[in-house]
Image (cartoon, grey):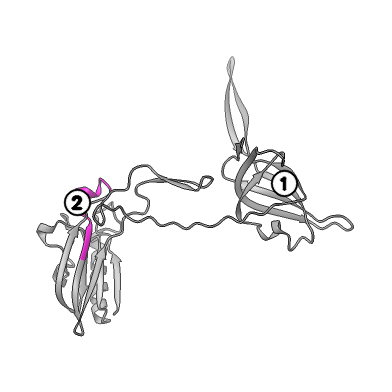
Amino acid sequence: MRLATANIWGLPTPLSWPPRHARFPRVRRFLEGALADALDVVALQEHWRIPGRPRALDDLELIVPARHEGHSGLALQTRHRVLERVHANFRNRAAHPLEKLFSSKGWQRVALDVDGARVDVINTHLEKSDYPLYDVDYEAGTVTFDSALPDIHTGDKAKAIHNSSYSAIVVELKKCSDFVMPENTHSVSSEQVYNSTIGSSSSSLGQGAFTQRLEDGVNDSVVTFKDQILWFKFFPDRNKTAYTLTQGKLGISRTFPAGAQIQAACTISAESEGTEHSA
């Protein structure tokens, strides 16, 4: 089977752009072309049934929810005989409060007769990946949502959460010195006015650094990790438990002196200060 899916951005201007009256004729040409190219199914999202919707698609016999079923913005075009159609709304209708004003998000199932075999096609509109808002703590390896995920999918279940994570590769850097931790520095500027001075302060994040002695300057561990975003765990006293932790992009500048040890001036370009840990 040949299938296509398209979000046609059916919200009124300025919530979507270009305006619907200019975009829907192009959607019609796309659907007419899909039939001409013998596509089996085209699934549409955001074909909202709201006032002012252009009528450019009304005579294409799209499969849409019935009036009493609420409206999810879902529609389906097919060249096959339809055996059954089912539409259901998620229990809480829509995840975002604004969406509840005009939509009842859900799913659409259409059973088709394809060369004598029944084929079920499911159409749904994915939720925004950034709702609810969340905060990622890369140091602790946790993700915290600012509110509970709504139970609006299958039964009492929330939407699935997917992430990409990696097992840490720990490499001890030996023969290094002069570690500098990325930290904020503060400065003061002033402006002279009559009979007084106006002062203001600003902060800037300094770059971390350390010096690394190398073996050949090519196959050393620190060289293989250059230009990558890494964690740096530094023990001021290797016999004690206190340490600092810094994340940043590793940059290196190698020096190959004649008759002396090869070394690299390494920089840590961080987006925030390092942290101190007493144990």
- Location of residue 54 with respect to 42 vertically, above or below: above
Tell me the number on the disc at residue 102: 2
- Location of residue 55 with respect to 240 vertically, above or below: below
Residue 79 lies left or right of residue 142; in this view the side is left
Density class for disc 1 (Cα within 10 Å; few <14, some 14-19, many ≥20) is: some
Query: Where, by quadrant of the figure, is residue 62 drawn?
Result: bottom left
Tell me the number on the disc at residue 56: none
Say if residue 64 shows up in the picture. no
Residue 278 percent across, percent down from the top left = 62, 35
Q: Residue at x 18, y 59 (%)?
A: 88
Density class for disc 2 (Cα within 10 Å; few <14, some 14-19, many ≥20) is: some
Residue under label 1 = 210
> What's the residue type where badge 2 is placed?
Phe
Looking at this view, is 191 or 243 the one in front? Answer: 243
Query: Where, by quadrant of the figure, is residue 257 drawn?
Result: bottom right
Magenta highlight on residue 107: yes
Looking at this view, is 53 or 135 the one in front? Answer: 135
The segment highlighted magenta reads 96-108
Residue 119 percent across, percent down from the top left = 22, 76
Q: Residue at x 22, y 58 (%)?
A: 106
Q: Quadrant of the C terminus?
A: top right
* Element at label 2: loop
> What's the residue type where badge 1 is placed?
Phe
